[in-house]
C-alpha cells in the first residue's frame, strides 16, 4: 500500500506517496526522470543501477523505498557542480574509462563510495571494489586507471 | 541549348583569380537514387551542415555503441574540411536526417563509410575555397584553410569563415572545384589521438539510450514470453490482468502484451497473465549439439582448395586429426534491447537501440503498412551491440503495440528476455586433419567447419595440399538460411565465425609445432610468406619479449594470429593454471594489430583492449546452456562475462601502415583470444583443450587425461 515517503535526491527533498516495497531504480527513472541510473539486470548482479544511499553504494534495483525513507540519495546527475565535472568524472573521460557508457554511472558511483572511504586505494583494492560491476565493452584497465588517477595515487604515463 | 530548368540550376558568382566560379545544384535525384540503390550519396550536403554559428553537423547512418566512431568519424570530417574537432556535432542513425546506411557491423564504418565521408568533406572544402576566392578576390592557390576560416596566405586579416560563405544554406557544386583528400603527412586531426566526444555526456548521465526517452502519455509494455523457442500458446487467461486498474491488454496475432502508464504496474500485470504452452522436444541440448550440427549439415561448400589431399596424406609422416568445438555465446550487452514508438495515421517515429536503423525503418514500415519515408527511426546511444542489435524485434513490438493502442509505447526488455531473444553466436564444430612431412613442413590441411561460416577459416600459412569447407552459407548467421541447423536463432557476434575458425587453426598450428619440436613462433614463420603477417607476428613477440621454447615449456605462454576485416593481428599472452580447480587466470596480453591507416590511435587501442578482455569470456566461461528451444542461462548469475579480476593487462601495439586505407578495428583482436589461451594452457600443462569455453571442469578433466608432463621453465 502507498505510504508517504520523504528523502533527498542529489540534495533536493522528494516527497512522494508510493508503495514502500517499490524499488528505488524505477522511481528514479520514472517519476523523478533521472535516467542516468541504468537498468541492467534487475537482480543486483551487474551494478549499472548503483547509487549512493547515505554515502554507501547500493543497487537501486534491489533497494526498496522503505530503505530510502529519510535518507540521502546521490545519483550520477548529482556529481557535477555548475557544469563542472568532479575528479572521477574527469578521470573517466581523460583515461577513456568508458566505451558504450551504459555501466559508467554505476562504475563512477561505486568508485565514489570507495574513494570516500579509502582516499588512496591500491589497484587491487579498486579491482575488488568494482568486481561486481560488469562492463561488457571491457574497458576494465582504463577504469582502474581512471579511479587510480582520480585518487591521486598514480596515473599511467 | 539548355532547358530553362538547367539554366536556373546554374549560377555564376563572379571572378576568382582569373577564373569564373560556376555553381550547379547537386542532383535532386541523388537522395532518391541512394535509397533505391543502397549506396552512399555523393552530395556533401547529405553528410554535412555548416551552421550560421560556425558549428558543423556531421550526419551519418552509422550508430555509436561504444566502439568510438562518434569520435573517429568526426575526426575524418574535421580533417578534410579544415575545422577544429570541437566544432563538430554528430547526428547518428536518424533515418530522416542521415544518409542511408545498411548498418553498423562487420568493422565497416571506418573502411566503407569513412571514405565516403572524407570525400564529401573534401568536396565541401573545395567548394568553400572557391567561394572564398571570389569573396576575397584572389586566386585559390593563394588561400589557406584553418579552423573553418579561409585566409590569404601571408595576410591573415583577409579572411572569411565557412559560416559566412555558407550563409546557412546548403552547398552548391562548383564546376571547377577539385576535391583532393589530405594525405597522412598532412594530417592534423586524423592519426592523432582524440578523447571520446561522447565522454562528457556519458559521465554525467546526460547520454540518452532508447529506454531513457520519454513522451507524454506513453505506456510501458510487458510482453508475454514463451518458456522455450518453438513453444505455441495453447491457452491464455487475461482476466486477472485486465481487472487491474489502468491496464490495457493487447492480444494481436502472436503478440500478447499488457500496458500501463506505470512500469511497475505493467510488470505486475504480466505476472497475472495465465498461459499454457505446448511442449517442445528437449533435443538437441548443450552436449548433443555438436553431433547434431555435423549430422544436420546438408552439404559442405568448398571455400579454398590447393594441390591434392591424397598426395598430402602420402607425403605426411605424421597426421594430426582433431575436432574442435564451441558452444553458443550470448552478446549480453549491458543495455537490453529497448524502443519507444509513436504511431499516427500517417506515419511512425521509433527510438530504438539498433545497429541497423535503416533496415529497421523498412521492416517497421512493412509491418505497419507505411511507405518507408513515413517511418523515422532515431537511434540514441547504444549500451553495447557486438552484433546483437542487428536484430530489431523490440522495435517491431513497440511499433505494433503503439499502432494498436494509439499511444506511445515503450518496450524495454528485462535481462531474461535479453538472454532469451539473443541471437547467439552459433555453436560450431571444426574437423581438421593436418600432416607434417619428415622436415616438419605442413603438407596436408583438410578442414571442415560446421554450424558457422567461413570467416577466418582461410589462413595465410603455406600448405601445398589443402581444402577448406563450410557447412553453412556464408551469411551473417541468419538461421533461416540453414533451416533445422540451430534450435533457435543465431546471429552475428563480434567477428562472426572467426572466433571458432581461428581457435581451430591456431590450436592446430600450435600442436604441430610442439610435435615437430619447434618453437611456435619459428614454426609459424616457417610457413608464412605474407610479409604483413610476419611483421605483425614479429612485432607482437618482440613487444612481449618472447623467448623461443618448444611447448609445453611450463611457462604458460601462448600465441595466435589471424587476419580479419582487412586487418592483421597477433596476440601473445601469459596465463597461470590452478591445477586443483582448473581455474585459469590471464595476467598479460600483448596484441599487435596492423589496421592500415589509424584514425584515432587511442580509440584503436581501446578496441584492442576491449576485444581482448571480452574474448576471455568466450574462451573461459561463456556458454549458453539449453535444452531444445529452452534457454537455461538467463541471468548474469549463471552466465559469467569477464569481470575486473578476469581482465588481463593488455598492451595494444599498433603496427604502422599509414599508406594502406583504414581497415576494420573492433573485431580482429577478439579472434585470436581462444587459441592464444588454449596454447598457453598447453604450454603450462601439456594438456590440449579443444572445446570452448575452457571451463574449470573441462580443464581438470583434460589435465587428468593428459599424459604429457610439463618440462619445467626455460
Image (spheres, coloured by chain):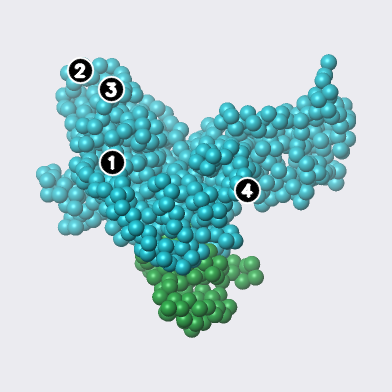
Chain colours: A green, B cyan
Asked if the residue at tag 3 contacts the one at tag 1, i.e. Cβ–Cβ closer than 8 Å, the answer is: no
Residue identifier under label 1: B487
Q: Given the image, what chain letter belongs to the residue carrying mark 4? A: B
Of all chains, the one bearing label 1 is B
Identify the element where label 3 is drawn: strand
- Which of pointers 4 and 1 lies earlier in the amino acid sequence? 4
Q: Are marks 3 and 2 in contact (CB under 8 Å)?
A: no
Whichever of labels 1 and 3 marks the residue nearer the N terminus, that label is: 3
On screen, residue B585 versus residue B406, left or right, reads left
Q: Earlier in the sequence, mark 2 or mark 4?
A: 4
The residue to which callout 4 is attached is B90
Q: Residues within 10 Å of mark 1 (few under 14, many from 20)?
A: many
* Disc 1 to disc 3, C-alpha distance: 32 Å
**Looking at the image, is B231 positioned above or below residue B205?**
above
Check chain identity for marks 2 and 1: say if they share one: yes
The answer to which image quadrant residue B296 occupies is: top left
Residue at image coords 31%, 24%: B301
Q: Label 2, label 1: how many angstroms apart (C-alpha)?
A: 36 Å
Q: Is residue A98 above or below residue B567?
A: below
**Pointers 4 and 1 in contact (CB under 8 A)?**
no
Using the numbered discs, state the Cα–Cα distance from disc 2 to disc 4 in whole angstroms: 57 Å
Marks 1, 3: nearer the viewer: 1
Dot 2 or dot 1: first in sequence order is 2
Task: Please name whichever residue, B479 or B522, is drawn nearer the observer in this view of the structure.
Answer: B479
Residue that badge 3 annotates: B466
- SS for dot 1: loop
Q: Secondary structure at mark 2?
A: helix
Q: Is residue B339 left or right of residue B550?
A: right
Residue at 19% across / 36% down in the picture?
B291
Q: Residues within 10 Å of mark 3 (few under 14, many from 20)?
A: many
Chain at tag 3: B
- Measured from the top left, where is residue B505 in percent x and y? 29, 34
Amino acid at each position: 500500500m502507498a505510504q508517504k515517503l520523504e528523502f533527498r535526491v542529489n540534495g533536493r527533498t522528494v516527497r512522494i506517496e508510493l508503495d514502500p516495497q517499490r524499488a528505488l531504480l524505477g522511481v528514479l527513472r520514472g517519476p523523478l526522470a533521472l535516467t542516468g541510473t541504468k537498468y541492467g539486470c534487475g537482480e543486483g548482479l551487474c551494478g549499472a543501477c548503483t547509487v549512493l544511499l547515505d554515502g554507501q553504494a547500493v543497487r537501486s534495483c534491489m533497494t526498496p523505498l522503505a530503505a530510502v525513507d529519510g535518507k540521502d540519495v546521490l545519483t550520477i546527475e548529482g556529481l557535477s557542480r555548475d557544469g563542472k565535472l568532479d575528479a572521477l568524472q574527469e578521470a573517466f573521460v581523460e583515461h577513456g574509462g568508458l566505451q558504450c557508457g551504459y555501466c559508467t554511472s554505476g562504475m563512477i558511483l561505486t568508485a565514489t563510495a570507495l574513494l570516500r572511504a579509502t582516499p588512496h586505494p591500491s589497484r587491487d583494492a579498486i579491482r575488488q571494489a568494482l568486481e561486481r560491476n560488469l562492463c561488457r565493452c571491457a574497458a576494465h584497465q582504463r577504469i582502474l586507471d581512471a579511479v587510480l588517477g582520480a585518487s591521486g595515487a598514480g596515473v599511467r604515463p | 541549348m539548355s532547358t530553362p530548368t538547367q539554366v536556373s540550376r546554374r549560377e555564376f558568382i563572379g571572378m576568382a583569380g582569373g577564373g569564373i566560379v560556376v555553381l550547379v545544384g547537386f542532383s535532386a535525384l541523388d537522395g532518391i537514387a541512394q535509397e533505391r540503390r543502397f549506396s552512399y550519396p555523393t552530395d556533401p550536403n547529405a553528410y554535412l551542415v555548416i551552421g550560421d554559428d560556425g558549428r558543423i553537423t556531421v550526419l551519418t547512418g552509422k550508430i555509436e555503441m561504444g566502439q568510438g566512431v562518434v569520435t573517429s568519424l568526426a575526426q575524418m570530417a574535421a580533417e578534410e574540411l579544415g575545422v577544429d574537432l570541437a566544432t563538430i556535432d554528430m547526428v547518428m542513425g536518424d533515418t530522416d536526417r542521415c544518409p542511408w546506411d545498411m548498418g553498423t557491423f562487420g568493422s565497416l564504418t571506418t573502411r566503407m563509410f569513412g571514405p565516403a565521408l572524407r570525400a564529401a568533406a573534401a568536396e565541401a572544402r573545395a567548394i568553400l575555397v572557391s567561394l572564398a576566392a571570389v569573396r576575397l578576390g584572389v586566386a585559390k592557390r593563394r588561400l589557406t584553410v584553418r579552423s573553418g576560416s579561409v585566409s590569404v596566405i601571408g595576410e591573415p586579416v583577409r579572411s572569411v569563415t565557412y559560416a559566412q560563405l555558407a550563409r546557412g544554406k546548403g552547398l552548391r557544386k562548383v564546376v571547377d572545384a577539385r576535391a583532393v583528400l589530405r594525405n597522412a603527412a598532412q594530417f592534423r586531426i586524423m592519426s592523432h589521438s582524440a578523447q571520446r566526444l561522447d565522454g562528457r555526456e556519458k559521465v554525467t548521465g546526460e547520454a540518452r539510450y532508447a529506454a531513457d526517452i520519454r513522451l507524454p502519455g506513453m505506456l510501458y509494455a510487458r510482453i508475454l514470453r514463451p518458456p522455450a523457442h518453438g513453444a505455441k500458446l495453447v491457452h491464455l487467461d487475461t482476466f486477472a490482468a485486465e481487472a487491474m486498474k489502468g491496464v490495457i491488454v493487447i492480444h494481436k496475432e502472436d503478440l500478447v502484451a499488457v500496458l500501463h502508464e506505470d512500469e511497475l504496474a505493467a510488470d505486475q500485470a504480466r505476472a497475472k497473465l495465465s498461459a499454457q504452452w505446448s511442449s517442445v522436444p528437449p533435443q538437441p541440448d548443450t552436449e548433443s549439439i555438436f553431433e547434431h550440427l555435423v549430422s544436420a549439415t546438408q552439404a559442405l561448400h568448398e571455400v579454398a582448395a590447393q594441390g591434392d589431399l591424397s598426395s598430402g596424406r602420402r607425403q605426411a609422416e605424421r597426421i594430426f586429426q582433431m575436432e574442435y568445438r564451441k558452444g553458443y555465446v550470448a552478446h549480453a550487452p549491458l543495455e537490453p534491447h529497448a524502443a519507444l514508438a509513436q504511431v499516427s495515421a500517417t506515419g511512425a517515429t521509433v527510438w530504438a537501440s539498433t545497429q541497423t536503423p535503416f533496415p529497421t525503418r523498412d521492416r517497421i514500415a512493412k509491418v505497419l503498412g507505411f511507405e518507408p519515408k513515413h517511418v523515422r527511426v532515431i537511434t540514441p546511444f547504444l549500451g553495447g551491440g557486438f552484433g546483437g542489435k542487428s536484430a530489431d524485434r523490440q522495435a517491431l513490438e513497440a511499433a505494433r503495440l503503439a499502432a494498436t493502442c494509439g499511444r506511445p509505447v515503450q518496450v524495454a526488455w528485462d535481462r531474461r528476455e535479453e538472454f532469451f531473444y539473443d541471437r547467439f553466436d552459433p555453436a560450431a564444430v571444426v574437423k581438421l586433419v593436418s600432416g607434417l612431412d619428415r622436415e616438419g613442413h605442413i603438407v596436408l590441411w583438410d578442414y571442415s567447419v560446421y554450424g558457422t561460416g567461413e570467416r577466418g577459416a582461410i589462413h595465410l600459412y603455406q600448405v601445398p595440399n589443402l581444402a577448406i569447407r563450410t557447412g553453412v552459407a556464408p551469411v551473417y548467421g541468419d538461421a533461416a538460411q540453414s533451416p533445422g541447423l540451430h534450435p533457435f536463432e543465431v546471429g552475428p557476434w563480434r567477428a562472426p565465425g572467426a572466433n571458432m575458425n581461428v581457435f581451430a587453426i591456431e590450436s592446430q598450428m600450435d600442436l604441430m609445432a610442439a610435435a615437430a619440436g619447434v618453437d611456435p613462433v619459428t614454426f609459424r614463420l616457417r610457413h608464412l610468406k605474407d610479409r604483413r603477417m610476419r611483421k605483425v607476428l614479429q612485432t607482437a613477440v618482440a613487444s612481449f619479449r618472447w623467448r623461443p621454447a618448444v611447448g609445453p615449456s611450463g611457462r604458460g605462454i601462448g600465441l595466435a594470429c589471424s587476419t580479419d576485416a582487412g586487418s592483421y593481428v597477433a596476440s601473445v599472452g601469459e596465463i597461470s593454471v590452478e591445477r586443483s580447480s582448473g581455474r585459469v587466470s590471464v595476467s598479460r596480453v600483448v596484441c599487435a594489430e596492423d589496421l592500415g591507416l589509424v584514425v584515432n590511435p587511442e580509440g584503436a587501442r581501446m578496441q584492442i583492449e576491449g576485444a581482448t578482455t571480452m574474448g576471455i569470456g568466450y574462451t573461459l566461461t561463456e556458454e549458453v546452456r539449453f535444452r531444445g528451444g529452452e534457454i537455461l542461462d538467463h541471468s548474469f548469475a549463471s552466465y559469467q562475462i569477464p569481470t575486473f579480476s578476469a581482465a588481463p593487462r593488455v598492451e595494444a601495439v599498433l603496427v604502422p601502415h599509414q599508406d594502406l586505407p583504414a581497415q576494420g578495428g573492433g573485431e580482429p583482436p577478439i579472434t585470436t583470444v581462444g587459441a592464444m589461451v588454449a596454447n598457453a594452457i598447453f604450454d603450462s600443462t601439456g594438456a590440449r583443450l579443444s572445446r570452448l569455453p575452457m571451463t574449470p571442469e573441462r580443464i581438470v578433466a583434460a589435465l587428468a587425461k593428459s599424459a604429457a608432463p610439463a618440462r619445467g621453465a626455460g
